[in-house]
Image (tube, rainbow, N blue to C red):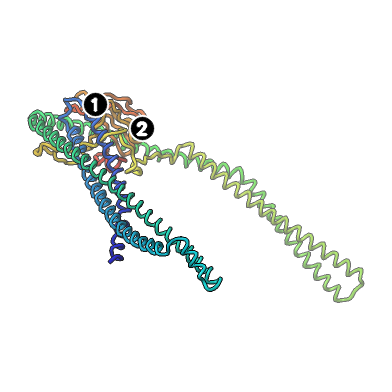
Amino acid sequence: MIKKLSFFISIILFGSAFGQKDKEVLQKQNADLKKQISSINASLNQTKQESKLSIAYLNAVNQKLSLREKVYNNTQKEKRFIEDDIYKRQLEINKNNRELEVLRKNYAEILVKAYKTKGVQNKVTFILSSKNMGEALNRIEYLKRYSEYQDKKAAEISNKANEIKKNITLKKRSISEKDNLLLSQKKDLATIEAEKIQKQQLLDEFKKNEVKLTAELRQKQTQSKELERQIRNIIAEEIRIAKAKEEAERKAEAERKRLAEIAAKRERDRIEAENRAKLAAAEAERKRAENEAKKASDLAIKKAEEERKVAESNKAAEKKEAAEKATRDAAERSKAANDKLAAAKANEAAVNKNNDDAKDAAEKKVMKSYGVGSTVGSNFADNKGRIGFPVEKGTVTHRFGRQPHPVFKNIVEENIGIKISVAKGTKARCVFPGVVSSIQAINGSRTVVVKHGSYFTVYSNLANTLVKANQQVSAGTLIGEVGSDFDESITLDFQIWNGTNPVDPLGWVSY
Protein backbone atom coordinates (compact mmCIF):
# COMPACT_ATOMS: atom_id res chain seq x y z
CA MET A 1 0.00 0.00 0.00
CA ILE A 2 2.80 2.37 0.97
CA LYS A 3 4.64 1.59 -2.32
CA LYS A 4 1.51 2.33 -4.35
CA LEU A 5 0.99 5.62 -2.52
CA SER A 6 4.62 6.61 -3.06
CA PHE A 7 4.30 5.81 -6.78
CA PHE A 8 1.11 7.91 -6.99
CA ILE A 9 2.81 10.87 -5.29
CA SER A 10 5.83 10.52 -7.60
CA ILE A 11 3.52 10.77 -10.63
CA ILE A 12 1.95 13.93 -9.20
CA LEU A 13 5.36 15.46 -8.49
CA PHE A 14 6.54 14.63 -12.02
CA GLY A 15 3.44 16.22 -13.50
CA SER A 16 3.73 19.29 -11.29
CA ALA A 17 7.20 20.04 -12.70
CA PHE A 18 5.66 20.38 -16.15
CA GLY A 19 2.69 22.21 -14.66
CA GLN A 20 5.03 24.84 -13.21
CA LYS A 21 6.54 25.45 -16.66
CA ASP A 22 3.06 25.69 -18.23
CA LYS A 23 2.04 28.15 -15.54
CA GLU A 24 5.06 30.34 -16.31
CA VAL A 25 4.20 30.22 -20.03
CA LEU A 26 0.63 31.31 -19.25
CA GLN A 27 1.88 34.15 -17.06
CA LYS A 28 4.17 35.35 -19.87
CA GLN A 29 1.32 35.12 -22.38
CA ASN A 30 -0.93 37.14 -20.10
CA ALA A 31 1.76 39.80 -19.69
CA ASP A 32 2.06 40.10 -23.49
CA LEU A 33 -1.73 40.17 -23.93
CA LYS A 34 -2.08 42.92 -21.33
CA LYS A 35 0.55 44.99 -23.18
CA GLN A 36 -1.50 44.62 -26.38
CA ILE A 37 -4.66 45.64 -24.50
CA SER A 38 -2.86 48.68 -23.09
CA SER A 39 -1.71 49.66 -26.59
CA ILE A 40 -5.26 49.33 -27.97
CA ASN A 41 -6.64 51.40 -25.07
CA ALA A 42 -4.10 54.13 -25.74
CA SER A 43 -5.09 54.13 -29.42
CA LEU A 44 -8.82 54.25 -28.62
CA ASN A 45 -8.32 57.09 -26.14
CA GLN A 46 -6.68 59.15 -28.90
CA THR A 47 -9.57 58.50 -31.30
CA LYS A 48 -11.93 61.39 -31.89
CA GLN A 49 -15.54 61.12 -30.84
CA GLU A 50 -16.59 61.33 -34.51
CA SER A 51 -14.54 58.29 -35.50
CA LYS A 52 -16.14 55.99 -32.94
CA LEU A 53 -18.70 55.04 -35.58
CA SER A 54 -15.97 53.51 -37.73
CA ILE A 55 -15.16 49.89 -38.52
CA ALA A 56 -11.59 50.50 -37.34
CA TYR A 57 -12.88 51.57 -33.91
CA LEU A 58 -15.28 48.59 -33.76
CA ASN A 59 -12.47 46.22 -34.77
CA ALA A 60 -10.25 47.65 -32.03
CA VAL A 61 -13.02 47.10 -29.43
CA ASN A 62 -13.58 43.54 -30.68
CA GLN A 63 -9.84 42.85 -30.62
CA LYS A 64 -9.53 44.20 -27.07
CA LEU A 65 -12.49 42.07 -25.92
CA SER A 66 -10.95 38.99 -27.55
CA LEU A 67 -7.64 39.65 -25.76
CA ARG A 68 -9.47 40.10 -22.44
CA GLU A 69 -11.15 36.72 -22.87
CA LYS A 70 -7.80 35.10 -23.68
CA VAL A 71 -6.37 36.58 -20.47
CA TYR A 72 -9.34 35.25 -18.49
CA ASN A 73 -9.01 31.76 -20.03
CA ASN A 74 -5.28 31.72 -19.29
CA THR A 75 -6.02 32.78 -15.71
CA GLN A 76 -8.49 29.89 -15.40
CA LYS A 77 -5.77 27.47 -16.52
CA GLU A 78 -3.28 29.07 -14.14
CA LYS A 79 -5.79 28.65 -11.29
CA ARG A 80 -6.05 24.94 -12.05
CA PHE A 81 -2.26 24.63 -11.93
CA ILE A 82 -2.24 26.38 -8.54
CA GLU A 83 -4.99 24.08 -7.24
CA ASP A 84 -2.95 21.08 -8.42
CA ASP A 85 0.05 22.51 -6.58
CA ILE A 86 -1.98 22.95 -3.37
CA TYR A 87 -3.22 19.35 -3.63
CA LYS A 88 0.32 18.10 -4.28
CA ARG A 89 1.65 20.03 -1.25
CA GLN A 90 -1.07 18.54 0.98
CA LEU A 91 -0.15 15.03 -0.20
CA GLU A 92 3.48 15.73 0.61
CA ILE A 93 2.55 17.09 4.05
CA ASN A 94 0.43 13.99 4.80
CA LYS A 95 3.23 11.70 3.63
CA ASN A 96 5.83 13.60 5.66
CA ASN A 97 3.63 13.47 8.79
CA ARG A 98 3.29 9.70 8.48
CA GLU A 99 7.05 9.31 8.03
CA LEU A 100 7.66 11.65 11.00
CA GLU A 101 5.33 9.59 13.16
CA VAL A 102 7.27 6.41 12.31
CA LEU A 103 10.60 8.14 12.98
CA ARG A 104 9.42 9.42 16.36
CA LYS A 105 8.12 5.99 17.33
CA ASN A 106 11.46 4.38 16.39
CA TYR A 107 13.38 7.07 18.23
CA ALA A 108 11.26 6.58 21.34
CA GLU A 109 12.16 2.90 21.31
CA ILE A 110 15.85 3.85 21.01
CA LEU A 111 15.55 6.21 23.97
CA VAL A 112 13.86 3.51 26.07
CA LYS A 113 16.69 1.10 25.32
CA ALA A 114 19.23 3.78 26.13
CA TYR A 115 17.50 4.43 29.45
CA LYS A 116 17.63 0.77 30.32
CA THR A 117 21.42 0.74 29.88
CA LYS A 118 21.50 3.33 32.77
CA GLY A 119 23.98 5.77 31.23
CA VAL A 120 27.75 5.76 31.01
CA GLN A 121 28.44 3.54 34.02
CA ASN A 122 26.52 0.63 32.47
CA LYS A 123 28.39 1.23 29.19
CA VAL A 124 31.70 0.90 31.07
CA THR A 125 30.46 -2.24 32.85
CA PHE A 126 29.31 -3.56 29.44
CA ILE A 127 32.83 -3.09 28.06
CA LEU A 128 34.73 -4.36 31.15
CA SER A 129 32.64 -7.51 31.32
CA SER A 130 34.10 -8.62 28.00
CA LYS A 131 35.84 -12.00 27.97
CA ASN A 132 38.86 -10.71 26.07
CA MET A 133 40.34 -7.64 24.41
CA GLY A 134 38.81 -8.43 21.01
CA GLU A 135 35.32 -8.64 22.44
CA ALA A 136 35.92 -5.36 24.36
CA LEU A 137 36.94 -3.60 21.13
CA ASN A 138 33.86 -4.94 19.34
CA ARG A 139 31.63 -3.68 22.18
CA ILE A 140 33.27 -0.22 22.01
CA GLU A 141 32.63 -0.11 18.21
CA TYR A 142 29.04 -1.24 18.76
CA LEU A 143 28.40 1.49 21.36
CA LYS A 144 29.96 4.08 19.03
CA ARG A 145 27.76 3.05 16.10
CA TYR A 146 24.69 2.87 18.34
CA SER A 147 25.34 6.45 19.46
CA GLU A 148 25.78 7.58 15.85
CA TYR A 149 22.52 5.79 14.95
CA GLN A 150 20.72 7.71 17.69
CA ASP A 151 22.12 11.03 16.38
CA LYS A 152 21.15 10.11 12.79
CA LYS A 153 17.57 9.29 13.80
CA ALA A 154 17.31 12.57 15.71
CA ALA A 155 18.59 14.45 12.63
CA GLU A 156 16.06 12.65 10.41
CA ILE A 157 13.25 13.73 12.70
CA SER A 158 14.51 17.35 12.61
CA ASN A 159 14.89 17.32 8.79
CA LYS A 160 11.46 15.81 8.29
CA ALA A 161 9.92 18.43 10.59
CA ASN A 162 11.65 21.20 8.60
CA GLU A 163 10.43 19.65 5.35
CA ILE A 164 6.86 19.68 6.67
CA LYS A 165 7.22 23.36 7.64
CA LYS A 166 8.58 24.16 4.18
CA ASN A 167 5.69 22.40 2.42
CA ILE A 168 3.17 24.11 4.72
CA THR A 169 4.74 27.49 3.82
CA LEU A 170 4.60 26.68 0.07
CA LYS A 171 1.01 25.53 0.40
CA LYS A 172 0.04 28.76 2.19
CA ARG A 173 1.83 30.74 -0.54
CA SER A 174 -0.11 28.86 -3.26
CA ILE A 175 -3.38 29.42 -1.38
CA SER A 176 -2.58 33.14 -1.17
CA GLU A 177 -1.67 33.16 -4.87
CA LYS A 178 -4.97 31.46 -5.68
CA ASP A 179 -6.90 34.01 -3.60
CA ASN A 180 -5.18 36.88 -5.46
CA LEU A 181 -5.90 35.16 -8.76
CA LEU A 182 -9.58 34.81 -7.86
CA LEU A 183 -9.73 38.54 -7.09
CA SER A 184 -8.03 39.25 -10.43
CA GLN A 185 -10.53 37.00 -12.17
CA LYS A 186 -13.44 38.85 -10.63
CA LYS A 187 -11.97 42.14 -11.89
CA ASP A 188 -11.36 40.62 -15.35
CA LEU A 189 -14.94 39.33 -15.51
CA ALA A 190 -16.27 42.74 -14.50
CA THR A 191 -14.09 44.40 -17.15
CA ILE A 192 -15.19 41.91 -19.81
CA GLU A 193 -18.84 42.51 -18.97
CA ALA A 194 -18.28 46.28 -19.09
CA GLU A 195 -16.54 46.02 -22.47
CA LYS A 196 -19.31 43.79 -23.81
CA ILE A 197 -21.78 46.49 -22.80
CA GLN A 198 -19.51 49.07 -24.49
CA LYS A 199 -19.46 46.97 -27.66
CA GLN A 200 -23.26 46.59 -27.60
CA GLN A 201 -23.66 50.33 -27.11
CA LEU A 202 -21.36 50.89 -30.06
CA LEU A 203 -23.43 48.48 -32.19
CA ASP A 204 -26.58 50.28 -31.05
CA GLU A 205 -25.03 53.56 -32.18
CA PHE A 206 -24.29 51.98 -35.55
CA LYS A 207 -27.91 50.84 -35.81
CA LYS A 208 -29.19 54.26 -34.72
CA ASN A 209 -27.12 55.92 -37.47
CA GLU A 210 -27.73 53.15 -40.02
CA VAL A 211 -29.35 55.41 -42.62
CA LYS A 212 -26.57 58.02 -42.46
CA LEU A 213 -23.76 55.46 -42.33
CA THR A 214 -25.11 53.28 -45.15
CA ALA A 215 -25.55 56.36 -47.33
CA GLU A 216 -21.95 57.42 -46.64
CA LEU A 217 -20.78 53.85 -47.22
CA ARG A 218 -22.53 53.63 -50.59
CA GLN A 219 -21.09 57.01 -51.54
CA LYS A 220 -17.65 55.71 -50.58
CA GLN A 221 -18.23 52.60 -52.71
CA THR A 222 -19.21 54.81 -55.66
CA GLN A 223 -16.00 56.81 -55.17
CA SER A 224 -14.05 53.55 -54.95
CA LYS A 225 -15.55 52.38 -58.25
CA GLU A 226 -14.60 55.69 -59.88
CA LEU A 227 -11.09 55.38 -58.45
CA GLU A 228 -10.90 51.79 -59.70
CA ARG A 229 -11.96 52.97 -63.18
CA GLN A 230 -9.27 55.64 -63.19
CA ILE A 231 -6.63 53.19 -61.97
CA ARG A 232 -7.62 50.71 -64.68
CA ASN A 233 -7.31 53.46 -67.28
CA ILE A 234 -3.90 54.50 -65.91
CA ILE A 235 -2.62 50.93 -65.90
CA ALA A 236 -4.09 50.22 -69.36
CA GLU A 237 -2.36 53.33 -70.73
CA GLU A 238 0.90 52.32 -69.03
CA ILE A 239 0.62 48.85 -70.57
CA ARG A 240 -0.16 50.35 -74.01
CA ILE A 241 2.85 52.66 -73.78
CA ALA A 242 5.02 49.81 -72.55
CA LYS A 243 3.89 47.57 -75.43
CA ALA A 244 4.43 50.34 -78.01
CA LYS A 245 7.83 51.03 -76.50
CA GLU A 246 8.61 47.32 -76.50
CA GLU A 247 7.58 47.00 -80.17
CA ALA A 248 9.59 50.08 -81.13
CA GLU A 249 12.53 48.73 -79.16
CA ARG A 250 12.16 45.35 -80.86
CA LYS A 251 12.25 46.98 -84.31
CA ALA A 252 15.13 49.22 -83.29
CA GLU A 253 16.94 46.19 -81.90
CA ALA A 254 16.43 44.31 -85.18
CA GLU A 255 17.73 47.29 -87.16
CA ARG A 256 20.69 47.73 -84.84
CA LYS A 257 21.43 44.03 -85.19
CA ARG A 258 21.27 44.23 -89.01
CA LEU A 259 23.59 47.25 -89.14
CA ALA A 260 25.88 45.68 -86.53
CA GLU A 261 26.15 42.46 -88.54
CA ILE A 262 27.08 44.48 -91.68
CA ALA A 263 29.66 46.47 -89.74
CA ALA A 264 30.98 43.32 -88.06
CA LYS A 265 31.39 41.54 -91.43
CA ARG A 266 33.20 44.59 -92.81
CA GLU A 267 35.52 44.58 -89.79
CA ARG A 268 36.13 40.82 -90.08
CA ASP A 269 36.99 41.23 -93.81
CA ARG A 270 39.42 44.07 -93.00
CA ILE A 271 41.18 41.99 -90.38
CA GLU A 272 41.21 38.99 -92.72
CA ALA A 273 42.87 41.12 -95.45
CA GLU A 274 45.44 42.54 -93.02
CA ASN A 275 46.35 39.05 -91.80
CA ARG A 276 46.33 37.38 -95.23
CA ALA A 277 50.05 38.21 -95.88
CA LYS A 278 50.97 36.95 -92.39
CA LEU A 279 49.03 33.74 -93.00
CA ALA A 280 50.72 33.25 -96.45
CA ALA A 281 54.19 33.86 -94.98
CA ALA A 282 53.51 31.45 -92.13
CA GLU A 283 52.26 28.80 -94.58
CA ALA A 284 55.35 29.28 -96.87
CA GLU A 285 57.65 29.02 -93.88
CA ARG A 286 55.90 25.82 -92.82
CA LYS A 287 56.28 24.31 -96.32
CA ARG A 288 59.99 25.24 -96.50
CA ALA A 289 60.52 23.67 -93.08
CA GLU A 290 58.68 20.53 -94.24
CA ASN A 291 60.96 20.28 -97.38
CA GLU A 292 64.12 20.81 -95.32
CA ALA A 293 62.97 18.25 -92.78
CA LYS A 294 62.27 15.74 -95.58
CA LYS A 295 65.71 16.31 -97.21
CA ALA A 296 67.44 16.05 -93.82
CA SER A 297 65.53 12.86 -93.08
CA ASP A 298 66.41 11.33 -96.46
CA LEU A 299 70.06 12.30 -96.01
CA ALA A 300 70.13 10.77 -92.56
CA ILE A 301 68.69 7.52 -93.94
CA LYS A 302 71.23 7.53 -96.78
CA LYS A 303 74.18 8.14 -94.45
CA ALA A 304 72.98 5.44 -92.12
CA GLU A 305 72.83 3.00 -95.05
CA GLU A 306 76.36 3.97 -96.16
CA GLU A 307 77.63 3.47 -92.60
CA ARG A 308 76.04 0.06 -92.52
CA LYS A 309 77.69 -0.91 -95.80
CA VAL A 310 81.09 0.36 -94.64
CA ALA A 311 80.73 -1.66 -91.47
CA GLU A 312 79.83 -4.76 -93.45
CA SER A 313 82.83 -4.45 -95.87
CA ASN A 314 85.25 -4.09 -92.95
CA LYS A 315 86.97 -1.08 -94.58
CA ALA A 316 89.57 1.04 -92.87
CA ALA A 317 88.75 2.45 -89.45
CA GLU A 318 89.16 6.05 -90.58
CA LYS A 319 86.55 5.60 -93.31
CA LYS A 320 84.26 3.95 -90.81
CA GLU A 321 84.71 6.88 -88.40
CA ALA A 322 84.07 9.40 -91.20
CA ALA A 323 80.90 7.57 -92.12
CA GLU A 324 79.71 7.56 -88.50
CA LYS A 325 80.40 11.32 -88.24
CA ALA A 326 78.49 11.95 -91.44
CA THR A 327 75.57 9.96 -90.05
CA ARG A 328 75.59 11.95 -86.80
CA ASP A 329 75.70 15.24 -88.73
CA ALA A 330 72.79 14.13 -90.87
CA ALA A 331 70.80 13.14 -87.78
CA GLU A 332 71.46 16.53 -86.14
CA ARG A 333 70.41 18.36 -89.32
CA SER A 334 67.27 16.23 -89.45
CA LYS A 335 66.45 17.07 -85.78
CA ALA A 336 67.05 20.79 -86.40
CA ALA A 337 64.81 20.66 -89.48
CA ASN A 338 62.05 18.92 -87.48
CA ASP A 339 62.32 21.52 -84.68
CA LYS A 340 62.08 24.27 -87.28
CA LEU A 341 59.01 22.58 -88.76
CA ALA A 342 57.34 22.35 -85.33
CA ALA A 343 58.06 26.05 -84.71
CA ALA A 344 56.64 26.93 -88.11
CA LYS A 345 53.44 24.96 -87.42
CA ALA A 346 53.07 26.62 -83.99
CA ASN A 347 53.58 30.03 -85.57
CA GLU A 348 50.96 29.30 -88.23
CA ALA A 349 48.48 28.15 -85.54
CA ALA A 350 49.17 31.27 -83.44
CA VAL A 351 48.62 33.53 -86.45
CA ASN A 352 45.31 31.78 -87.19
CA LYS A 353 44.18 32.04 -83.52
CA ASN A 354 45.14 35.70 -83.29
CA ASN A 355 43.23 36.29 -86.48
CA ASP A 356 40.08 34.57 -85.11
CA ASP A 357 40.38 36.33 -81.72
CA ALA A 358 40.77 39.68 -83.41
CA LYS A 359 37.66 39.06 -85.53
CA ASP A 360 35.59 37.94 -82.47
CA ALA A 361 36.71 40.95 -80.45
CA ALA A 362 35.94 43.28 -83.33
CA GLU A 363 32.44 41.74 -83.73
CA LYS A 364 31.66 42.09 -80.00
CA LYS A 365 32.89 45.68 -80.00
CA VAL A 366 30.73 46.56 -82.98
CA MET A 367 27.64 44.83 -81.48
CA LYS A 368 28.13 46.67 -78.19
CA SER A 369 28.55 50.01 -79.97
CA TYR A 370 25.18 49.41 -81.66
CA GLY A 371 23.54 48.50 -78.30
CA VAL A 372 22.47 45.03 -79.41
CA GLY A 373 21.21 42.70 -76.60
CA SER A 374 20.76 45.27 -73.78
CA THR A 375 17.58 44.49 -71.77
CA VAL A 376 16.22 45.53 -68.34
CA GLY A 377 13.74 43.49 -66.21
CA SER A 378 11.82 43.60 -62.91
CA ASN A 379 11.91 41.06 -60.06
CA PHE A 380 8.73 42.15 -58.22
CA ALA A 381 7.16 38.70 -58.72
CA ASP A 382 10.27 36.97 -57.33
CA ASN A 383 9.74 38.69 -53.97
CA LYS A 384 6.16 37.55 -53.38
CA GLY A 385 5.53 37.20 -49.64
CA ARG A 386 8.64 39.23 -48.73
CA ILE A 387 7.57 42.69 -49.93
CA GLY A 388 7.44 45.35 -47.20
CA PHE A 389 4.26 46.66 -45.53
CA PRO A 390 3.06 50.09 -46.78
CA VAL A 391 2.99 51.61 -43.26
CA GLU A 392 5.23 51.20 -40.24
CA LYS A 393 2.35 50.17 -37.99
CA GLY A 394 -1.31 49.52 -38.77
CA THR A 395 -4.27 47.13 -38.55
CA VAL A 396 -6.01 45.61 -41.57
CA THR A 397 -9.72 46.45 -41.20
CA HIS A 398 -11.00 45.44 -44.66
CA ARG A 399 -9.65 42.49 -46.63
CA PHE A 400 -9.47 41.76 -50.34
CA GLY A 401 -12.53 40.52 -52.27
CA ARG A 402 -16.22 40.35 -51.34
CA GLN A 403 -16.68 40.82 -47.59
CA PRO A 404 -19.92 41.17 -45.58
CA HIS A 405 -20.16 44.40 -43.60
CA PRO A 406 -19.48 43.59 -39.90
CA VAL A 407 -22.57 45.53 -38.77
CA PHE A 408 -24.97 46.03 -41.68
CA LYS A 409 -25.62 42.51 -42.95
CA ASN A 410 -27.51 43.74 -46.02
CA ILE A 411 -24.34 45.37 -47.37
CA VAL A 412 -21.54 43.43 -49.05
CA GLU A 413 -18.27 45.26 -49.71
CA GLU A 414 -16.14 44.37 -52.69
CA ASN A 415 -12.54 45.45 -52.19
CA ILE A 416 -9.80 45.33 -54.84
CA GLY A 417 -7.23 45.90 -52.12
CA ILE A 418 -7.01 46.17 -48.34
CA LYS A 419 -7.75 48.98 -45.89
CA ILE A 420 -5.25 49.65 -43.11
CA SER A 421 -6.19 51.66 -40.03
CA VAL A 422 -3.29 53.81 -38.77
CA ALA A 423 -2.57 56.55 -36.26
CA LYS A 424 -2.96 60.19 -37.24
CA GLY A 425 0.12 61.56 -39.00
CA THR A 426 1.21 58.15 -40.38
CA LYS A 427 2.95 58.28 -43.77
CA ALA A 428 2.55 55.61 -46.43
CA ARG A 429 5.79 54.23 -47.84
CA CYS A 430 6.67 52.52 -51.10
CA VAL A 431 6.91 48.74 -50.77
CA PHE A 432 9.29 48.05 -53.70
CA PRO A 433 11.62 49.94 -56.07
CA GLY A 434 9.82 51.44 -59.07
CA VAL A 435 8.71 54.59 -60.89
CA VAL A 436 5.79 56.85 -59.91
CA SER A 437 3.38 56.31 -62.77
CA SER A 438 0.59 58.71 -61.82
CA ILE A 439 -0.82 60.93 -59.07
CA GLN A 440 -4.60 61.41 -59.03
CA ALA A 441 -6.92 63.57 -56.91
CA ILE A 442 -10.52 62.49 -56.17
CA ASN A 443 -12.83 64.35 -53.76
CA GLY A 444 -9.98 65.95 -51.86
CA SER A 445 -7.90 62.77 -51.35
CA ARG A 446 -4.93 61.70 -53.46
CA THR A 447 -3.87 58.42 -55.03
CA VAL A 448 -0.34 57.45 -56.09
CA VAL A 449 0.33 54.64 -58.60
CA VAL A 450 3.86 53.16 -58.68
CA LYS A 451 5.03 50.94 -61.56
CA HIS A 452 7.26 47.91 -60.89
CA GLY A 453 7.77 46.35 -64.33
CA SER A 454 4.48 44.61 -65.18
CA TYR A 455 3.19 45.10 -61.59
CA PHE A 456 1.68 48.22 -59.97
CA THR A 457 1.12 49.28 -56.34
CA VAL A 458 -1.60 51.82 -55.47
CA TYR A 459 -1.70 54.06 -52.37
CA SER A 460 -5.08 55.79 -51.90
CA ASN A 461 -6.81 58.08 -49.39
CA LEU A 462 -3.72 60.27 -48.95
CA ALA A 463 -4.02 63.75 -47.43
CA ASN A 464 -0.93 64.88 -49.35
CA THR A 465 1.86 63.44 -51.49
CA LEU A 466 5.64 63.51 -51.08
CA VAL A 467 6.60 62.21 -54.56
CA LYS A 468 6.24 63.40 -58.16
CA ALA A 469 5.22 61.70 -61.39
CA ASN A 470 8.05 59.79 -63.15
CA GLN A 471 10.12 59.88 -59.94
CA GLN A 472 12.34 56.88 -59.27
CA VAL A 473 11.45 55.48 -55.83
CA SER A 474 12.92 52.72 -53.70
CA ALA A 475 11.50 50.46 -51.00
CA GLY A 476 10.73 52.70 -48.01
CA THR A 477 10.38 55.97 -49.93
CA LEU A 478 7.66 58.05 -48.23
CA ILE A 479 4.68 58.40 -50.59
CA GLY A 480 2.41 60.73 -48.59
CA GLU A 481 0.49 61.22 -45.36
CA VAL A 482 -2.54 58.99 -44.82
CA GLY A 483 -5.82 60.94 -44.68
CA SER A 484 -9.14 60.39 -42.90
CA ASP A 485 -12.00 58.36 -44.37
CA PHE A 486 -15.69 59.30 -44.47
CA ASP A 487 -16.10 57.98 -40.90
CA GLU A 488 -13.13 60.06 -39.70
CA SER A 489 -10.88 57.00 -39.26
CA ILE A 490 -7.32 57.35 -40.59
CA THR A 491 -7.20 54.64 -43.25
CA LEU A 492 -4.85 53.75 -46.11
CA ASP A 493 -6.30 51.97 -49.14
CA PHE A 494 -3.53 49.77 -50.58
CA GLN A 495 -3.70 47.70 -53.78
CA ILE A 496 -1.41 45.52 -55.91
CA TRP A 497 -2.11 44.97 -59.60
CA ASN A 498 -0.63 42.29 -61.88
CA GLY A 499 -1.13 44.04 -65.20
CA THR A 500 -4.87 44.82 -65.36
CA ASN A 501 -5.80 42.35 -62.59
CA PRO A 502 -5.89 43.33 -58.88
CA VAL A 503 -4.45 40.69 -56.52
CA ASP A 504 -4.74 40.17 -52.74
CA PRO A 505 -1.94 42.31 -51.17
CA LEU A 506 -1.81 40.07 -48.07
CA GLY A 507 -0.45 37.30 -50.31
CA TRP A 508 2.45 39.57 -51.30
CA VAL A 509 3.44 41.77 -48.37
CA SER A 510 5.14 40.64 -45.18
CA TYR A 511 2.42 41.38 -42.56
The foreground one among 253 and 427 is 427
Q: Amino acid at mark 2?
A: Gly
Quarter occupied by the C terminus: top left
Residue 146: percent from left, percent from top: 45, 63
461 sits to left or right of 151: left
Residue contact at pointers 1 and 2, CB within 8 angstroms: no
- Labelled disc at residue 423: none
For the point 40% across and 57% down, the residue is 154
Residue 190 image position (x, y, % from top left): 16, 37
Residue 293 quadrant = bottom right
Q: Is residue 413 left or right of residue 510?
A: left
Q: Position of residue 307 (x, y in %)?
A: 83, 70
| Crowd class of label 2 (few under 14; some 14 to 19; many from 20; radius 10 Å) | some
Q: Quadrant of residue 227?
A: top left
Secondary element at tag 2: loop
Q: What distance separates the C-alpha of mark 1 from that of mark 2?
A: 19 Å
Residue ID for mark 2: 476
Q: Amino acid at mark 1?
A: Gly
Residue 415 in sight: no
| Quadrant the N terminus occupies | bottom left
| Residue 451 or residue 65, whichever sits in front | 65
